[in-house]
Image (cartoon, helix red, strand yellow):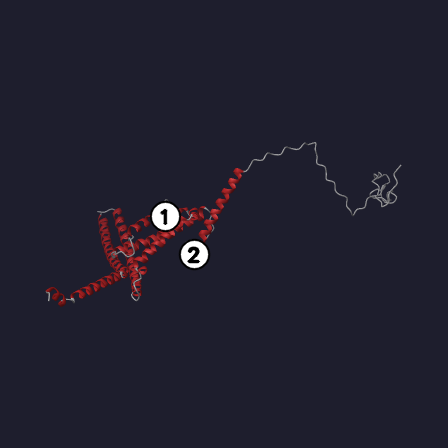
Amino acid sequence: MDPVWAAIAEFWWIGPTMIGAGTLGWIGLRRGRSTKARRLAYDASRDALRQARQDAAAARVGVRVARAELSQVQAEATAGRASHAEVAAARRALDAAQRNTRAASAGVRARRANLSADRVALSAQSGRGADPAQLPLARLMATDDAITARWMQYETDAARQLAFPALGDARVPTTAAFLAELKTTRALRPAAPDVRITPAQFTAYRDGVARLGRAFDAAEAEAWRLARKDRSAPAGPGPDAAAPAAWVVSAQEIAQNLTQSVLARGAEALARATAPRTQPAPPEHPAKSEQPARQPPDATTRPTPPNASPGGDQTTGTPRADQASDAPPAPPVWPIPSRSARPPRP
């Protein structure tokens, strides 16, 4: 028997073993990557809490140092070797150190709360499959995209641009702060949701997204305030209302009303500019006077017989006794119409 085939027959089990080991190693590596992706937010919060505690400890040390320096300067001022300005400066340094300590303590509490929330989210995700859309980095990028979509609504809608121009004007301080935070967040944003980043990079990006959301809320509220002040917009619930859908509808109504009013005023101005000029009518001659319109005879009034006065007897035409005798006789009227033909007058 050929020695080669004999060796193959003897060690045939090495090939399947190596293939199985490679498969298990690939599966373990893939599972490890998935586990790291799920634990990314938790690991980042844990590292951030550790760093916040270190910052708080350093701030407390700074307070003790500032308090000791203040005591030294006060003693030197009592001995005449320090001025009151130096004492005031040391006191201001102590106040600043105490404010930093309070801020660091608040940061520790916030990091501890984030760690608790990430622990609960991690325990909820461990019982189901690793959905790529539910990974911490993917959810954080979705939050970033939602903030950008809210801002782009004011940039792409012409009606909103007319109603809220402050969100597109970098001279407004709140808008300038939002644009600066947007630039910083874009620099920290990963290329894709499935890339591998460190917990420190995740923490920096998450803090940037949080600052971006607060900056946009402030810029949006300022734009609403300026819109109500400059354009006399109707008072709506505003972006700080409890129901966001209501103020979005109100914003659309304000923008539509403003656009319609602008278009209507433009159409009126164009109509006045293109209308033909009419010549004034010539004045009438003063000699010509309007003739009073003849009133048609009333059918209910009977014609006065001839030789009868308005207040006399209609049969004889003589005035009544209660009238003056020297009253002028009434003028004759046309003959009363009759049914039979009358002979012609001589």
Total number of numbered discs in the rendering: 2
In the rendered view, would you say 271 is above or below 58? above
**Dot placed on the residue nearer the N-terminal end, 1 or 2:** 1
Q: Which residue is mark 2?
A: 245
User: Residue 34 location in percent, x, y?
Assistant: 26, 61
Q: Which residue is mark 1?
A: 175
- Between circles 1 and 2, the one closer to the viewer is 2
SS type, badge 1: helix
User: Residue 80 location in percent, x, y?
Assistant: 22, 47
- The quarter holding residue 37 reads bottom left
| In front of the other: 211 or 325 | 211
Location of the C terminus (image quadrant): top right
In the rendered view, would you say 284 is above or below 164? above
Give the Cα separation between the discs numbered 1 and 2.
23 Å
Q: Which mark is residue 61?
A: none
Tell whether 121 sits left or right of 26: right
Category of crowding for the residue at label 2, using alpha-carbon neighbours closer than 10 angstroms: few (below 14), some (14–19), many (at least 20): few
User: Residue 17 location in percent, x, y?
Assistant: 18, 66
Location of the N terminus (image quadrant): bottom left
SS type, badge 2: helix
Give amino acid for label 1. Answer: Thr
Of all residues shown, which one is farthest toward the right? 346
Give amino acid for label 2. Answer: Ala
User: Residue 307 location in percent, x, y?
Assistant: 86, 41
| In front of the other: 191 or 83 | 191
Residue at 32 percent of width and 53 percent of height: 211
Residue at 40 percent of width and 51 percent of height: 153
| In front of the other: 297 or 167 | 297
